[in-house]
Image (cartoon, rainbow, N blue to C red):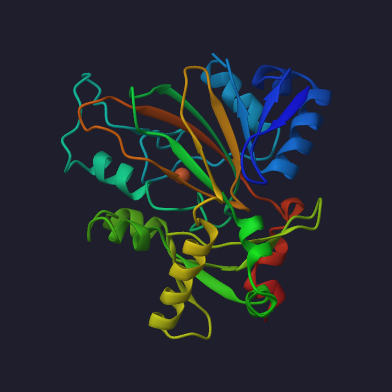
């Protein structure tokens, strides 16, 4: 297995081991797991695999999230983002799925608004537009390291609130339905996630983050916006242009990502499996009840 670095201090392509190998072999899993802990974003090429292989691969890393609301694929391990209707037509630009795609274009980390949050996402893109629709990443570890020491000290024991409805509200006021709001109440996490394997810290915030404990609403939101801008500054991101057979896995503890726009009249379908974080992934230390109370 070869691991070839791609981005500015994070992201790498894995060659010589594919998703089916990891699903079947302990040694392949161990190699890819180590690369995941180190590089945060992994690209696999030429993976023309079934949904079953995507699930078997993902299960190696931990329990899978079952999509409950706010996604096509509800009740399954697949979260599906597409502008294609079941009859093959494309949704209009004001359709809920088109607005969701817009919300997905805000810098975020998957499922920080859930308890438990996500360890990782595995994304395949079976239908890609001829241009646009890329996925962009930024390392929250690198962002943490670039912060002034005083800011790191301030954030290390700070707690922030995350809410699905908050990020959706930036696109359209009622994009998150009553049912989604009820199923996804706000959650609080520490703002620094420490990786238990290598001890590296990362900043844990996203477009879903709406408040910081001990700060006024305005103060908190200003700081959150500044931190996201800092994390995603020019020269610190890596953009992936999808090709058929590509699969990307990323570490939601320590990278932000966003989709890029594409033409409304071009079909796109991406399918994600999401792996839930456990205490072995450093989750226990993220909880306010266990650490700050
Ligand atoms: Fe996402």
Q: Is residue 169 above or below residue 124?
A: below
Depth order, front residue of 7/88: 7
Which image quarter: residue 183? bottom left
Does residue 113 lie above or below 9 as drawn?
below
Left or right relative to 181: residue 116: right
**Is residue 117 left or right of 26 when viewed as pictured?**
left
Residue that extends furthest to the front in the rendered view of this protein: 235
Q: Is residue 77 visible?
A: no
Indicate the position of residue 14 as horizontal and vertical percent values: 69, 26
Instruction: State how many labels appear.
Output: 0
Q: Quadrant of the N terminus?
A: top right
- Which image quarter: residue 216? bottom left
Above or below: residue 114 compared with residue 221? above
Residue 220 on image: x %, y %? 46, 78
- Which quarter shows the C terminus? bottom right
Pick whichever, 20 or 255, lies toward us: 255
Near-viewer residue (61 or 128): 128
Q: Position of residue 30 (x, y in %)?
A: 81, 31
Q: Position of residue 191 (x, y in %)?
A: 60, 68
Task: Please indicate, yes or no, whether residue 62 appears anywhere in the rendered image.
Answer: yes
The residue shown at (70%, 42%) is 39
């Amino acid at each position: 297995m070869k691991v070839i670095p791609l981005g500015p201090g994070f992201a790498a392509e894995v060659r010589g081991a594919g998703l089916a190998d990891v699903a079947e072999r302990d040694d392949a899993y161990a190699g890819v797991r180590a690369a995941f802990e180190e590089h945060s974003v992994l690209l696999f090429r030429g993976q023309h695999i079934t949904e079953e292989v995507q699930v078997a691969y993902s299960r190696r890393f931990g329990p899978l999230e079952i999509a409950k609301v706010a996604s096509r694929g509800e009740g399954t391990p697949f979260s599906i983002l597409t502008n294609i209707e079941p009859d093959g037509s494309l949704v209009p630009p004001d359709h809920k799925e088109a607005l969701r795609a817009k919300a997905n274009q805000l810098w975020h980390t998957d499922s920080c608004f859930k308890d438990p949050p996500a360890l990782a996402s595995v994304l395949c893109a079976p239908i890609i537009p001829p241009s646009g629709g890329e996925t962009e990443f930024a390392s929250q570890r690198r962002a943490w390291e670039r912060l002034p020491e005083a800011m790191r000290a301030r954030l290390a024991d700070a707690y922030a609130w995350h809410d699905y409805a908050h990020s959706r509200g930036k696109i359209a006021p009622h994009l998150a339905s009553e049912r989604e709001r009820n199923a996804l109440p706000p959650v609080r996490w520490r703002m620094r996630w420490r990786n238990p394997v290598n001890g590296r810290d990362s900043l844990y915030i996203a477009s879903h983050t709406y408040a910081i404990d001990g700060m006024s609403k305005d103060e908190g939101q200003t700081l959150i916006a500044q931190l996201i801008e800092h994390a995603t500054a020019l020269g610190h991101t890596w953009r992936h242009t999808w090709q058929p057979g590509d699969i990307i896995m990323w570490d939601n503890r320590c990278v932000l990502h966003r989709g890029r726009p594409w033409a409304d009249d071009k079909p796109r379908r991406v399918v994600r499996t999401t792996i839930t974080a456990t205490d072995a992934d450093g989750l226990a230390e993220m909880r306010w009840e266990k650490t700050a109370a």
